[in-house]
Amino acid sequence: MTGGGIIDQTNRALRDIGLCGLFLLQIVGRLRLSTRQWGEVMRQLYFIGTRSLVIILTSAFFVGMVLGLQGYNTLVQFGASESVGAVVALTLFRELGPVLTALLFAGRAGTSIAAEIGLMKATEQLDALELMAIDPIERVVLPRFIAAVLALPMLTALFNMLAVLGSYLFAVEWTHLDQGLFWSRMQSVVDFQADYVSGFIKSVVFGIVIALISVFQGYTAEPTGRGVAIATTQTVIVGSIIVLVLDFVLTALLI
Amino acid sequence: MMDNSEQTAFIELENVVFRRGPRTILDDFSLSIPQGKVVAIMGPSGVGKSTVLKLITGQLKPASGRVIVNGQRVDVMSDRQLNQYRKTLGVMLQNSALFTDLSVYENVALPVREHTGLTETIIRRLVLTKLHAVGLRGALDLYPRELSGGMARRVALARALVLDPALVLYDEPFTGLDPIAVATVNQLIGHVNRALSLTSVLVTHNVEQINQLADLAVILVEGKVAASGSPEQLIEDQSPAVRQFMNGLPDGPVPFHYPARDLSEDLLA
């Protein structure tokens, strides 16, 4: 890439960050908490949250099993196999739970939000709303944004639960580790405040980031098939990168 | 200009200039649309017909000039004023723009729910009346994906009319429809305009339908009004641009070739 190309790209990225920030202010400014708005939020929560359950829970279960397997194989060499539950829980609650759920959520729900809003724009549905004096940000963007922000922490909690269950099944049922030891080591090592709450804070921040990127990409998409395709792809790429970068920043701040 | 000295102008565009990037779409453009008529804005694709419509709805603002609708300056309205103004408009967009996640009934009911505090019983009566008027009362539970192009256009018409607007704007209402649907939509637009004493503005390039439907027609060429008058007057008009458009000739004042270098230069290069 030429020097000019890099400068152009940087300029565009900085402009998008600025526009994204302004868009967030526009969304938050329209929060009314009216019954009708919450009704729509609940409907979107179903589409965004409930429909992401299959991919999140299946992934969580196998991630838990793999962590159990890897943890057990390493710990058994030091005669510390009973700590497998604690190691898995720490890995999950602090890092893998929030990060993997956010990445999966960007792929499953983020793309669907961006594509839906982008398509509404391409088929003039957003124009139609504006022409009926109905604010498209309040009507279309806000409910999806709020639903995505609410869904991610809940999905992360479910991811953590299923992953712990997966590791439990591997460690206790497969390797016949004592289940009392498995749970008691986990209980004594994991600190609710330092481990679980810090993970929860991460998932809230990731939720806001992915929700904002999805609605922004959809709303500002070029109103063509190609434009919608780019918005969908960008949601995953930008969403994933920002989640991983923010994960480092948040870990450094919270540790 | 249109001879409408005896009629009240409902919409007036005065010396409007509109540019998109370096290109001037409308250049010192003036148009007066009388109240209670069906007026067609015609012209070749890309000439700025839809731009005129978007100036009337306030979606676009002119670089200079004035846009006046029913005595109000649309081009200087704030967002709040535009919202109030748009509640008095009905707009039917080119591809109907029905909300895909809502049923036919909910699509038509949406503007009523948003802008009035009417009870569900009254909303239902209102929506059913409008759907009955476009012949689709039986389709109220269908979703837009289950409708044909003509049916979708009729639902969009019912939705545009549900708040009893004074002005209805139609962007290419006949595009992509089969002959039966075209005739149906044509008849409905005329009927609705007469029955409800509306002012209707259509953007279209369907010459045949306009002859039957419009009271007045305007032909735009290169960002200016090339001719205006009743469809009969336009058929008689002898100016080359009007003849080319009315008779569908591929070459004329609107050239067949996109501007390019000389052919021999290009081929021998």
Image (cartoon, coloured by chain):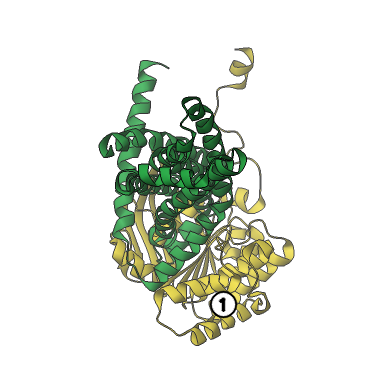
Q: Residue at x 59, y 62 (%)?
A: B173
Is residue B45 shown to the viewer in this render? no
* Residue denoted by label 1: B192
In the image, is residue B210 above or below residue A223?
below
Dot 1, crowdedness within 10 Å: few (<14), some or many (≥20)? Answer: some
Q: Residue at x 50, y 27 (%)?
A: A74
For the N terminus of chain B, the quadrant is bottom left
Instruction: From the viewer's side, name the closer residue of A125 and A189.
Output: A189
In the image, is residue B116 above or below residue B80?
below
Q: Residue at x 34, y 52 (%)?
A: B62
User: Residue B156, located in which quarter of the rendered image?
Assistant: bottom right
For the C terminus of chain B, the quadrant is top right
Chain A's shade in the image? Answer: green
What kind of residue is marked 1?
Answer: Val
Horizontally, residue A220 falls left or right of residue B219, namely left
In the image, is residue B242 above or below residue A170?
below
Instruction: From the viewer's side, name the closer residue of B173 and A54.
Output: A54
Callout count: 1
Task: Label 1, secondary structure: give it.
Answer: helix
Horizontally, residue A22 falls left or right of residue B173, namely left
Instruction: From the viewer's side, name the closer residue of A208 and B120.
Output: A208
Measuring from the top left, give residue A221's x and y in whole percent: 47, 44
